[in-house]
Structures are given as C-alpha cells and as structure tokens.
C-alpha cells in the first residue's frame, strides 16, 4: 500500500469539506478511462482520498491499497509535469504543489506488527475527516467499535485475501475485550453532490484487555486503517483516520 501526500498552498484559510469530492473527480479524470471505469464500478474501492487543511496549507492525500493500481496513480501524482491541482468547482481553483511525501506500508510490515511480542494495549484514533457507517439503510455517525472493526476487517480481507468475509467470532472477541476509555467527537455533515451525509470527527482512546495475540491483531488492524480508512465513502474524502500507540507512561494515556 502506498500513500502519496501533495502539500499545496491554501489561500482560502477556510475549511472546505467539498475538496475531497472535487479532488476525486480530478484524479479519476487524469487516469486512463479503463482504469477510472474499473475504480468507479468496484464495490470496495482499492484507494482512499482525504484532504487536510491547516496553517495555510492543504494536503491532498491518496492511498493506493492494491499493487496493480500503484503505477497508474504514480504516473499522475508523481509526474515531474504536475505542478498544481486544478479544481474548477472549488472556491480556490488552483493549488500549487509545494511538496510531495510518499509513504509505504506492506503486508510484511503488518505481519511484523502482528508478531511483535510487546504490542501496546491502548490506542488513540483521530477521525480527521467526517466518518459514518451505513447499516440496514441507515447512517450511524458515532464511533461504534463493532462497526469500526467490521469495516477494517472487511477491507483487510478484500485487499489481502480477495474476499469480504468477516470472522464473526474474532469480531465478537474484539468487541468484548476492548472499550472506548475517552472520546472527544462532534457531529458533522459531509457534502457529496446534492446530499449531506451525517458523520462525526474527533478522537477516541481505546483500551484492549484481551490477551497479547488479540492486542497484536488489533494493533495491526488499526495500523492498516490509517491507510485504508474506515466506514463509507473513503474514496470521496470520508473516514480518514490517524492511529497512535499509547505507551505506558505517555502523558496522553
């Protein structure tokens, strides 16, 4: 998996939640037609998009989850000829690229996370773009651990096992042996075309009181989530998370 961050000048100094949707449209337009069509038709998207705005900068972030898509995205975002992102529908039309950052997370990296002997049992999660889940046709917009784990497990299996099966026994054990110990979240509405999807942003801290193997698995799953996103519409800017291990003695723990 590969994460590409394009750091651009942001002259608006005002958060624009529509940038993720506009950026997705721009990116798909840059890709070959057959690639863009395949991405549009896939049920679980093999990529995520998110946008961060802070201190006069906008970070356009693309994470590619499937190896066969990496080169196609590289050809666009890492091209020497790409100097700016042009979003005709946004308030700021031109975002000049000042810096590119590339990060890679492999299946081997995740395996090493799983097999480490001293994985922590407390984790911080920041949902930095609006996050929501859809269950039985209804939106759920609160950090529900079952929905978070289920989303990540399904995505992990699609990416690495080519199926969307979720081990219900393992899911039940994760839910039973973890809990949210603190949170600071707020409700949001994320605009997609003419709809406004209810969601939430903010931070939670999760403790695991299961055995070390379960803690290792959860550590791996959340690390995967920092690339794959969680919940719905992650290819349009929703569900982006950052993950932090909270070690003993950490003042944030």
Image (cartoon, rainbow, N blue to C red):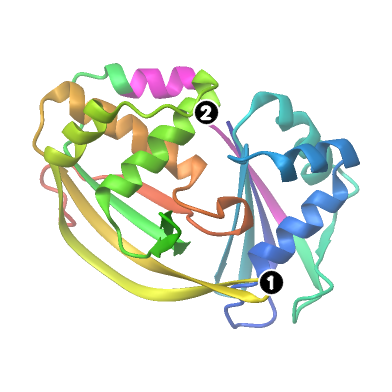
Quarter of the image with the N terminus is top right
State the residue at coordinates (28%, 16%): 115
Disc with the residue nearer the chain's start (2 vs 1): 2
Residue 54 sits in which quadrant?
Answer: bottom right
State the residue at coordinates (37%, 65%): 141
Residue 173 sits in which quadrant?
Answer: top left
- Which numbered tag is attached to residue 250? none
Q: Nearer the viewer, residue 112 or 90?
A: 90
Residue 21 lies, in percent from the top left, at: 68, 64
In the figure, 38 relative to 143: above or below?
above
In the figure, 68 relative to 148: above or below?
above
State the residue at coordinates (26%, 19%): 116
- Which numbered tag is attached to residue 193? 1
Magenta span covers which residues? Answer: 98-113
Element marked by disc 1: loop
In the figure, 243 relative to 96: above or below?
above
In the figure, 116 relative to 218: above or below?
above
Residue 146 lies, in percent from the top left, at: 27, 46
- Which numbered tag is attached to residue 158? 2
Residue 89 lies, in percent from the top left, at: 80, 75
Estimate the spatial distance between the alpha carbons at disc 2 and disc 1, rounded to whole Å. Answer: 27 Å
The answer to whether residue 118 is seen in the rendering is: no
State the residue at coordinates (39%, 68%): 200
Element marked by disc 2: helix
Q: Is residue 99 magenta?
A: yes
Residue 153 lies, in percent from the top left, at: 39, 33
């Amino acid at each position: 998996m590969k994460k590409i961050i394009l750091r651009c000048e942001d002259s608006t100094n005002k958060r624009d939640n529509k940038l993720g949707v506009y950026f997705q449209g721009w990116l798909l337009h840059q890709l070959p037609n057959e690639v863009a069509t395949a991405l549009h038709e896939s049920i679980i998207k093999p990529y995520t998009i998110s946008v961060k705005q802070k201190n006069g900068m906008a970070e356009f972030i693309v994470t590619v989850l499937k190896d066969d898509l990496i080169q196609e995205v590289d050809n666009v975002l890492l091209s020497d000829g790409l100097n700016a992102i042009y979003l005709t529908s946004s308030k700021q039309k031109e975002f000049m690229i000042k810096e590119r950052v590339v990060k890679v997370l492999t299946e081997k990296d995740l395996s090493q996370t799983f097999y480490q002997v001293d994985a922590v049992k407390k984790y911080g999660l920041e949902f930095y773009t609006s996050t929501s889940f859809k269950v039985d046709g209804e939106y759920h917009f609160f950090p529900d651990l079952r929905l978070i784990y289920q989303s990540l497990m399904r995505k992990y299996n699609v990416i690495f096992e080519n199926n969307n099966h979720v081990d219900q026994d393992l899911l039940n054990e994760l839910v039973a042996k973890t809990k949210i110990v603190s949170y600071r979240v707020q409700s949001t509405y994320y605009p997609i075309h003419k709809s406004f999807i209810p969601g939430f942003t903010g931070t939670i801290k999760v403790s695991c009181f299961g055995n070390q193997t379960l803690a290792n698995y959860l550590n791996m799953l959340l690390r995967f989530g920092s690339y794959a996103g969680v919940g719905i519409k992650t290819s349009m800017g929703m569900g982006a998370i950052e993950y932090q291990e909270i070690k003993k003695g950490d003042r944030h723990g």
